[in-house]
Image (cartoon, rainbow, N blue to C red):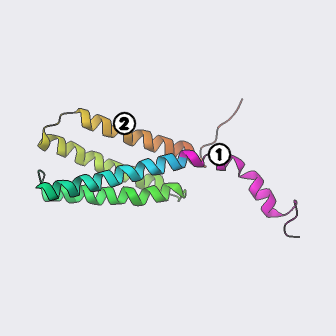
Amino acid sequence: MLGTPHSETYRYRASTDNVSQRRPVLRFASLGMFAYGVYSVGWAAADLIRGARLELWAELGLVVFGALLVLAAAFVRVRLPGGLAFAIGALLGLQALAVHDAVHLQTGVTPQIIRAVVAITLALVALAGSPGVERKAR
């Protein structure tokens, strides 16, 4: 019988209660990744409009990796297998370009450290919200 408390869907919904508690964590991580990706694309677009201070390939790299991070944020949110790895790859690409940009813009190490801390925090928050991470209470 469908809809009775003893059906399969009832047991399935009852067993996923702990997963629904992780949704705010995944929402935070995916929104943070989305914002970081949009920031990277916007920064590159604004730099191209004002007059590029970096090489064209570096600006286009920021656009590509930023767009990949925006796409990966959606994958992280829906818990697509490999979505977090995809997001980490995009974050690493943006970090590599941050190293290149720091040399050309002579901004030093501080912006790189801030970007790295943001990227690591977002990846760890997404990992904490993934369903594969189980907390053992003892």
Q: Which residue is mark 2?
A: 117
Q: Position of residue 69 (x, y in %)?
A: 37, 55
* Residue stretch in magenta: 1-25
Query: In the image, is 86 to the left or to the right of 126?
Result: left
7 inside magenta stretch: yes
CA distance for labels 2 and 1 = 25 Å
Q: Main secondary structure of the magenta part?
A: helix
* Image quarter of the N terminus: bottom right
Instruction: Name the foreground residue: 21 vs 76.
Output: 21
Task: Report the disc number at residue 123.
Answer: none
Residue for point 26% across, 38% down: 112
Furthest toward the top, the residue is 138
52 inside magenta stretch: no
Quarter location, residue 123: top left
Badge 1 element: loop
Q: Residues within 10 Å of mark 2 (few under 14, many from 20)?
A: few
Q: Position of residue 3 (x, y in %)?
A: 84, 66
Q: Which residue is mark 1?
A: 21
Badge 2 element: helix
Q: Position of residue 130 (x, y in %)?
A: 56, 48
Quarter location, residue 95: top left
Circle nearer the N terminus (2, 1): 1
Q: Residues within 10 Å of mark 1 (few under 14, many from 20)?
A: few
Amino acid under label 2?
Answer: Val
Q: Classify 99 as above or below 45.
A: above
Residue for point 53% across, 48% down: 26
Amino acid under label 1?
Answer: Gln
* Image quarter of the C terminus: top right
